[in-house]
Image: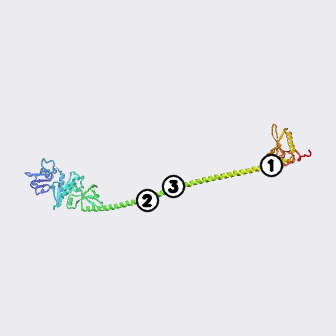
Amino acid sequence: MSFTALHPDAGRLDATDPELGCGLAWSSIYKVRPRIPLTCPDCGHGVHARRSTRGLRHFAHDRQRPEHCELAEESMEHHLLKLQLAGTIRETDWIAELEVAAPDSSWRADVMATSPDGSRRIAWEAQLSPITVDDIQARTARYLDAGVETCWVTTRRETAWLGQVPSIRVDPEDDRWRVDDGVAGFDYDTGRWSVQPMPLQSFVTWVHRRALAFHIILPRYRRVHRPVDQDYARRPVLWTTNRSTEAEARHERMRQRQDERKKAWQEKQAELEQQREEREAEEERLRLEAEAARKARDERHRRLRNEHQELQRDLDTLVRRGRWALDDRRREHALEQRRLQEEAAARKREEQRAADLATGQAWWGVLSAQQRTDLNEAVTAAAWKELTTRAEIKTDELWPQYAYGKVARFHGRRPGVFGIIRPCPELAARCPDLRHERIFVRNAGEARLLVEAGLDAAHITDFGLPDFEQTALC
Ligand SMILES: [Zn+2]
C-alpha cells in the first residue's frame, strides 16, 4: 500500500490530504467508472484508491505488480508512522508532502516538511527496518547536500543509529506519540545530558521554530542519562535547546578550567614529588656517606685495637721474659749465695776439724810413747779379763766422732767396739756418739775432765795410771 499515486491529468495525489494535495475530491478517484489509470510513483504499476476497514484512505497496487516496489513493500506500521508525521506537521503552519523524491532520485523523503515561506525543508524519515549507522549517515549527508534538514524517526527500542544522526524515538502506544528518546536537556549542576520526553506535536513545532536544534554533543558529555529506565546511552547527536547547548559549553569551559587547574596541580605535585625524590636521594647519599665514614672509623678503631693488642702482647712477652731473666738472676744469685755459704760452712768445718785435730793431737801429745803403750796394754788386759778376748787397738788412728779418741775393737764370735780410749775432754761435749760407748782413760784426773764435759761417769773406766812418766825411775 501507499499514500501517493500519479494521476494522468492532476499529477501527484496524496491520500492523506483531504483534497489529495491537488484540489481533487476523494470521490473523484474512489470507485469511479470508468477507472482512472492511476500509477505507482515508484514502480509505475497500476494502482487503485482504497479505504481500509478502519477508514484509512490509501492506494493499492493492481494485480501482478512488479517484484520490487518499495512503496508496495512498506509495512502498515511504516505507513501509519508517515501518516502521523504528515498529520503532525500539518498541525503547524508547514506544508507536508509524502514520498517526495529528489530530481536526480538521489533521495526520496517519506514526509517532506516545507516552511510557509519555502525557505526551509525538513525530511522526516520513518525508519523501522534495520539500517547501518554508515548508511544512515550517508543518507543524512545527501539531504544536507541538497539543503534539506532531516530527522529520523523510529518506534523501535534498539536501534544502533539512534543518537548518531538527528533522530528521535516515538512511542506509538502513547496517545500523543510521545518522543521518549533523542531530545535531551543539559543540567549544569550534574554536568550531564538527560533525555526529556515530550509529545510529538510539541517536538515538531519546536523544531520548525528552531526552538530545538540537533546538536553534536561535546565528547566529554556523550553518556546521556535516560530517566525512563535510569540508564545511560552513548549519544553523539541529540535534539536540544540553545540554553542547554550554552549550558554545556559553559560547563565545558568550567571543566577545561578544572582540567587546567588539575593539570597545574598535577604538575605542581609532580614537581613536589621530584623535589621530594631529590631530597630523599640527597638524604640517602648523606646516609651512605655517613655509613661509609662510620665503617671507615670502625675499621680504623678495629685496626688500632688490633695494633694495641699486638703491642700489649709484645709488651707482655717482654715483661714475662724480663721477669724470667730476673728470676734466673735471682735464682743464680741465691745459688751463688748458698754456694758461698756452703763454702764458708765447709771452710769453717774444715777449720773446726783442723782446730779439733790440733786439739786432739795436743791432747795426745802430752803422752809419751810409753804412756800410750801402757794405756793400750791396760785396755787389752781389761778386755781379756772381762771377755777373754783380745782387743785390737789401732794406735795411729784418732776418730773425730769420738773426740779424737782411739777405738778398741775385739774379734771373735761377736765382733764389736769394746770402747773408746781417752777422748779429748775439750771436744767430748760435741760428740754425741761418745755417750753410748764405754770410755777408757788413764786415771781419775782425765775421768773428771770428761764428766765435766757431760759424759756419764758410770761409762768411764780409769786405770789409775800416773800423770807423769817416771822415766827417771826406770
Ligand atoms: Zn509501486
Q: Residues within 10 Å of mark 2 (few under 14, many from 20)?
A: few
- Callout 3, which amino acid? Glu
Q: Circle 1 sits on which residue?
A: 356
Compared across the picture, whether 209 is left or right of 187 comes to left
In three-dimensional space, the C-alpha distance between marks 1 and 2, rounded to whole angstroms, equals: 107 Å
Q: Secondary structure at mark 2?
A: helix
- Callout 1, which amino acid? Asp
- Callout 2, which amino acid? Glu
Q: Secondary structure at mark 3?
A: helix
| Residue 99 appears anywhere in the view | no
Quadrant of the rendering where the C terminus is positioned? top right
Residue that lies at the very extreme toward the left in this rendered image: 34
Compared across the picture, whether 367 is left or right of 142 comes to right
In three-dimensional space, the C-alpha distance between marks 1 and 3, rounded to whole angstroms, equals: 82 Å
The answer to whether marks 2 and 3 mark residues whose Cβ atoms lie closer than 8 Å is no
Q: Circle 2 sits on which residue?
A: 282
Residue that lies at the very extreme toward the right in this rendered image: 473
Of the image marks 1 and 2, the number of the one nearer the N terminus: 2
Q: Is mark 2 within 8 Å of ligand 1?
A: no
Q: Circle 3 sits on which residue?
A: 299
In three-dimensional space, the C-alpha distance between marks 2 and 3, rounded to whole angstroms, equals: 25 Å
The answer to which of 472 and 138 lies nearer the viewer is 472
Of the image marks 1 and 3, the number of the one nearer the N terminus: 3
Query: Residue 17 at what x, y percent from top left?
Result: 14, 56
